[in-house]
Each structure stands twice: as structure tokens, then as C-alpha cells.
Image: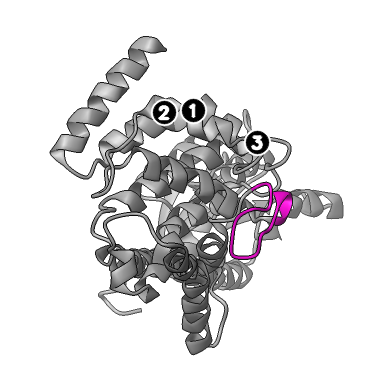
């Protein structure tokens, strides 16, 4: 041991002065020692700021027995990793079994042999160094995994919002539409998470993925010609057919990105469902496949209501935004035809949250003022 290396500290716990003197004499060359003449004192030292590296513990002591001391040491996260070696006159096999079952690292019977004591201590300290190293490595690895996971999540968020923002730049009337609809979807999902029809699906992880995936619902708009997408008025029938293709274009764009990666990406699973299915209707009259009822993915059903509500209350070149009450009336009328009935009921239960989200992410100061008036009216009526 070099001069720069501190000697390990051994706590000797025994109520007999002769035993203490003998053990300290054995240890004095290679170790620093601390002494406790009872269990209470031993626990106080072990829980102090300068913890011992190992404890030599007698069993038969007045007050707390060594067994009791060991139990408390091993039940306390602050001391459970300190190796305990019983040093005792109790030599029955059952005594040793009891000591080891309580978590002791070793068991030495008196009268002690100095070489045996030193060898056992050396072994346990070496094992403790390995244990401490592995524990520190595991702590570091867990921290690194958390850091890397957070980085990946952040990259996913950036990728989603970049892709969604690209679509929104093609349609400059929609503004904060992607933010509002994401929060609408999350609010609906949280309301329905304990509903018998949805509880199997809507756990914390799924709701978070839905929230993150929702902004991609209109990603397919990047493939719609400007002459149609930016038209300041209603579409002609042939233009509407082209506009409808944005659902397929959006899904296929995400699939193409996954194909380039060579894997299916979990966090884009719902994005594909939402992009492709958010224009489906509960009664089967929607597009692109004319799916009906539960055949429509839950993610798409949630987005369908969120998307329609925001379209109704938002101002466009060709129309003013409706009032919240007008939008509610239209959505209520669409219960069981356009929208899943239970999702519609959830919307009606939490419509105040929708109004608050619309205000929080209003596109302009003018819209914010109008939506604030609607909140005040809605709150007064409620």
C-alpha cells in the first residue's frame, strides 16, 4: 500500500475489552480501526458521515445482540453494502446459518487466528471493491441510457414537428392548427383512458405517442398542388378528389421514410394511422377506405373529432370561425354518424378544455380576443 492510499477502516464491535484489544492488534498494521462496545454505538458509527469499510461484529452483547445489529444494517440502504463478519464464541452450525441468513458476509469463531481474520477481511474487502465498481458502472450506464433516451425522444419530437411544419407552410391559413389538435387529442385520450371501450389501449405511453404523432395528420398536404391546396374557396368535385389523396400521401410518406431506415419505427405507428384514417367517418361515409365503427383506428377517431372542431372554429380566407357553441352543435349532430359516439360524449364532457386550448394557441391577437370572449361566454353559461 502506497503512502497516497488510505488504509481501509474496520469497525470492531465487542463488549469485551480483551477481545477488542486482540482484534485491534491484529488489524493495526494494515487497517484503521473504530471501536463500539455495544450495538447502539455500532449503528451510530455505521450511519455516520465516515462509514467503515467493514464491520467485525460480536453476537452476544448486552442490549442489542449482533444479530439485531446486522438486521438493522442490512435493512438500511445507507449501510446494507458494508460487509459484516461475525466474530463470536457461538460455534454451532445453526448459529452460523443464522448469521449468514441475516446478510453477514462471513462468520469466524473464537478463539480467533490472526492469519484467518486477515485473510477473511482481505477477501471481503476485495469483493466489496468489485461490488462498488459494478454498482458505480451500473449507475453510470443507467444515467447514460436515460440521457441517450432523452436525446432520442427529443430528436423524434424535432423530426415530427419539422415534418408537420413543412406541411403547414404549404397551407398558411392553418397557423397553430397542429398544436391545437395535438392538445385536443391528448385531452380526449386522457378523458377516455378509463372508459371500458378504450382502457385497454389508452395507457400513459400510448397517450404520449398520440400527442407526439398528431401533428403529422396532414403531412400528406405536401403532395397536393398549390392551385388546389391554396384555393381561397370551396373545391370543385375533381379538386376534392385530389385533395382527398393527402391521407394516402401522408401514410405513404411515413412508410417510405421507414423503408429507408430499414425498420418500422414505433413512434410513427400512430402517425400512419392518423394520417391515413382521420377522414374516415363512424358510419362508413368517409375516406380513403370507407371504414366504419371500430374498424377505424382509435387514434384516427380521436383526430377526426379534434380536426373537425378546429376547422370549424378557425378563420379562413373564405370564412370566419364559428363560435364554440356552433361547433358543438355540429359535432353533436355528427354523433354516431361522423364521430364515435363515446368520443363525442367525452368531447362534450371536456369542451371547456377545448376552448382553453384554442385560446392558448390562437393564431392571431384578433383570434385570441375573439376566443377569450367565447371562453367568458361559455364560462358564464356553464
Instruction: Confirm whether the magenta stretch covers residue 292.
Output: yes
Q: Quadrant of the N terminus?
A: bottom left
| Magenta span dominant secondary structure | loop
The mark closer to the camera, 1 or 3, is 1
- Dot 3 falls on a residue whose secondary structure is helix
Of the pair 293 and 114, the residue shown nearer to us = 293
For image coordinates 68% across by 47% down, the residue present is 283
Residue occupied by mark 2: 326
Q: Is residue 247 above or below residue 379?
A: below
For image coordinates 55% across by 62% down, the residue present is 270
Q: Is residue 189 left or right of residue 290?
A: left
For image coordinates 48% across by 74% down, the residue present is 249
Residue occupied by mark 3: 341
Of the pair 158 and 223, the residue shown nearer to us = 223
Of the pair 20 and 253, the residue shown nearer to us = 253
Q: How far across and how far down the image is residue 29, in percent?
A: 41, 69
Q: Is residue 217 above or below residue 29?
A: above
Callouts 2 and 1 close, C-beta under 8 Å: yes
- Name the quadrant containing residue 161: bottom left
The mark closer to the camera, 2 or 3, is 2
User: Crowding at label 3, few (<14), some or many (≥20) Cα neighbours within 10 Å?
Assistant: some
Amino acid at each position: 500500500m502506497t503512502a497516497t492510499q488510505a488504509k481501509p477502516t474496520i469497525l470492531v464491535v465487542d463488549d469485551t475489552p480483551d477481545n477488542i484489544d486482540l482484534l485491534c492488534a491484529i488489524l493495526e498494521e494494515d487497517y484503521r480501526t473504530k471501536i463500539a462496545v455495544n450495538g447502539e454505538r455500532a449503528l451510530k458509527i455505521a450511519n455516520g458521515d465516515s462509514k467503515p469499510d467493514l464491520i467485525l461484529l460480536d453476537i452476544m452483547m448486552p442490549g442489542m445482540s449482533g444479530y439485531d445489529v446486522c438486521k438493522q444494517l442490512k435493512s438500511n440502504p445507507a449501510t446494507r453494502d458494508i460487509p459484516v463478519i461475525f466474530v463470536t464464541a457461538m460455534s454451532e452450525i445453526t448459529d452460523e446459518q443464522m448469521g449468514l441468513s441475516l446478510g453477514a458476509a462471513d462468520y469466524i469463531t473464537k478463539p480467533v487466528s490472526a492469519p484467518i481474520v486477515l485473510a477473511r477481511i482481505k477477501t471481503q474487502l476485495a469483493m466489496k471493491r468489485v461490488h462498488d465498481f459494478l454498482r458505480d458502472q451500473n449507475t453510470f450506464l443507467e444515467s447514460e441510457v436515460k440521457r441517450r433516451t432523452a436525446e432520442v425522444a427529443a430528436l423524434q419530437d424535432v423530426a415530427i414537428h419539422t415534418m408537420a411544419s413543412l406541411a403547414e407552410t404549404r397551407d398558411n391559413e392553418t397557423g397553430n392548427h397542429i398544436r391545437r389538435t395535438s392538445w385536443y387529442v391528448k385531452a380526449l385520450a386522457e378523458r377516455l383512458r378509463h372508459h371500458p371501450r378504450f382502457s385497454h389501449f389508452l395507457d400513459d405511453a400510448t397517450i404520449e405517442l398520440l400527442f407526439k404523432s398528431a401533428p403529422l395528420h396532414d403531412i400528406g398536404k405536401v403532395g397536393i398542388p398549390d392551385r388546389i391546396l391554396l384555393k381561397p374557396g370551396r373545391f370543385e368535385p375533381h379538386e376534392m378528389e385530389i385533395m382527398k389523396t393527402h391521407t394516402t400521401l401522408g401514410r405513404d410518406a411515413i412508410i417510405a421514410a421507414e423503408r429507408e431506415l430499414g425498420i418500422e419505427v414505433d413512434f410513427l405507428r400512430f402517425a400512419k394511422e392518423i394520417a391515413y384514417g382521420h377522414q374516415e367517418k363512424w358510419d362508413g361515409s368517409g375516406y380513403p377506405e370507407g371504414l366504419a365503427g371500430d374498424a377505424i383506428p382509435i387514434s384516427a377517431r380521436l383526430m377526426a373529432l379534434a380536426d373537425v372542431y378546429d376547422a370549424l372554429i378557425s378563420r379562413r380566407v373564405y370564412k370566419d370561425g364559428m363560435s364554440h357553441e356552433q361547433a358543438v352543435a355540429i359535432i353533436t349532430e355528427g354523433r354516431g354518424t361522423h364521430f364515435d359516439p363515446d368520443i363525442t360524449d367525452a368531447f362534450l364532457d371536456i369542451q371547456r378544455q377545448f376552448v382553453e386550448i384554442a385560446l392558448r394557441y390562437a393564431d392571431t391577437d384578433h383570434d385570441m380576443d375573439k376566443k377569450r370572449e367565447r371562453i367568458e361566454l361559455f364560462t358564464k353559461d356553464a
